[in-house]
Image (cartoon, coloured by chain):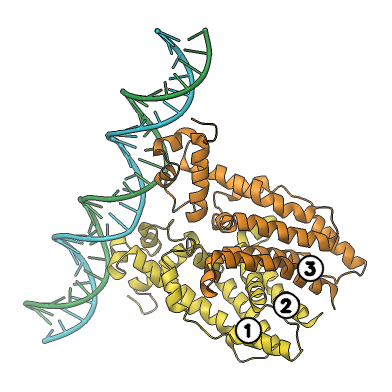
Chain colours: A orange, B yellow, C green, D cyan
DNA sequence: AATAATTTTAAACGATTGTTTAAAATTAGG
DNA sequence: CCTAATTTTAAACAATCGTTTAAAATTATT
């Protein structure tokens, strides 16, 4: 096997990530994954003990190692305006690379006792929120309006992430190609911070 | 059978709606639905010809008869400010009643050639957009800033709908009960229009 | 009351699911 | 080169999937 080839284990995990992200856990079969990895189903259970364990590895990697690091930009030590621009920019670039990631993560969290909820609490150790702290400080200094931090955080997340969750709907409604959709998302790198910051600074 | 009892057909459709919205098409079994409707699996296929057809009825009802009418508020003949407040209020109330609806609709649209895409185009006949027209008129009059309509529409939709899609994540992260979550959503009835209108009116 | 139409039941169908087995092929180590 | 460990293969496992069948029970019609 040449050096450029992936190991069988890697091919299977990559195939699993692709298919799980596309169809979700319930609609994905072990045979789907094996075929996509160009192997047989026995090898899937040889390297990963079960479909369930393979899924958990994919989920942990997608959420913990891909999404969370970008989300943590809000905890960076940066001025408010620069931080918001950086967050929207990096998150948009991540989602352009991995547009199915948010739907994958959130759809697997349907049902309060979903199999990923326990994993979430494990990964999501209570982190101090530098963003909240920052909004409160700037409001105290009179630089921005006093706001409910949660509302601002939710709105910011919503405006960046939701378009990718509703990507197919959007593309249909507005008759967009994938390229045109990504261009629309790029324009949001300015539009979203502008809206948030205009809101924070006025009235 | 007493008059207050539902017909078997209604019980099955209600059960199907409940389970499909909770788990999606792929993770729902005909036996799930039959058990939830307190009947047997043969009756599911007796009244609805297949799981597929039952799903399509549920989807069409959820999207076409529940979600779309509220979304069409943006086409109402109302002043801009009143319209935005009305849209956010009605959509929030709808989603408090049916919090799983957006995730259900959007998760079934994964994959460009999903089985609901054809249905969408059928339902979603090109509608004139009074909201876009209105934003352009007000901007021409100098009442609000000139904006890309799509960006405003996407942001508005995102801020209202996304919190319900990420409901479980939000409840976990912020340690919210269902009641506290709904209270947060109620507060957004003011916060969202304020942000949009502040943005439109300034600079 | 007798008959026809409708609704419900229990059982089974073949197909597909996740998983396991045991032998074959390949690679690694002495 | 021989042996041991690892990887790959083909086949099968029981369980569950969506769906169908045919008879039983119920309701409606005359």
**Residue B60 percent location from the top left of the image:** 43, 74
For the point 76% across and 77% down, the residue is B199
Could you say where residue C2 lies in the image, as x and y percent from the top left?
6, 77
Closer mark to the observer between disc 2 and disc 3: 2
Left or right: A121 in relation to B12:
right
Dot 2 falls on a residue whose secondary structure is helix
Label 3 marks a residue whose chain is A
In primary-sequence order, the first of circles 1 and 2 is 1
At label 1, counting other C-alpha atoms closer than 10 Å, the crowd grade (few under 14, some 14-19, many 20 or more) is: some
User: How far apart in space, not on screen, are marks 2 and 3 (Cα)?
Assistant: 16 Å
Q: Rounded to the nearest whole Å, what is the CA distance between mark 1 and mark 2?
A: 14 Å
Question: Could you say which quadrant of the image residue B197 lies in?
Answer: bottom right
Q: Quadrant of the C terminus of chain B?
A: bottom right
The residue to which callout 2 is attached is B196
Q: Which residue is mark 1?
A: B132
Quadrant in the rendering for residue B157: bottom right
Please state the chain letter of the residue tagged with numbered disc 1 in the rendered image. Answer: B
Q: Which mark is residue A148?
A: 3
| Residue A48 in view in this figure | no
């Amino acid at each position: 096997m040449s050096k450029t080839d992936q190991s069988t284990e890697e091919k299977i995990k990559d195939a699993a990530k692709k298919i799980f992200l596309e169809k979700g856990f319930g609609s994905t079969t072990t045979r789907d994954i094996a075929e996509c990895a160009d192997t047989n189903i026995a090898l899937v259970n040889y390297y990963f003990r079960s479909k369930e364990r393979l899924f958990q590895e994919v989920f942990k990697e997608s959420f913990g190692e891909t999404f969370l690091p970008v989300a943590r930009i809000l905890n960076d030590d940066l001025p408010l305006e620069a931080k918001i621009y950086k967050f929207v920019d990096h998150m948009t670039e991540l989602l352009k690379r991995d547009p199915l990631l948010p739907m994958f993560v959130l759809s697997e969290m349907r049902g309060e006792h979903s199999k990923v909820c326990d994993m979430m609490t494990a990964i999501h150790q209570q982190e101090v929120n530098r963003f909240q702290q920052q909004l409160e400080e700037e409001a105290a200094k009179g630089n921005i309006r006093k706001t409910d931090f949660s509302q601002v955080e939710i709105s910011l997340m919503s405006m960046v992430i939701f378009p990718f969750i509703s990507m197919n709907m959007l593309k249909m409604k507005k008759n967009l190609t994938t390229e045109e959709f990504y261009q629309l998302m790029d324009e949001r790198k300015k539009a979203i911070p502008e809206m948030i910051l205009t809101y924070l600074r006025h009235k």
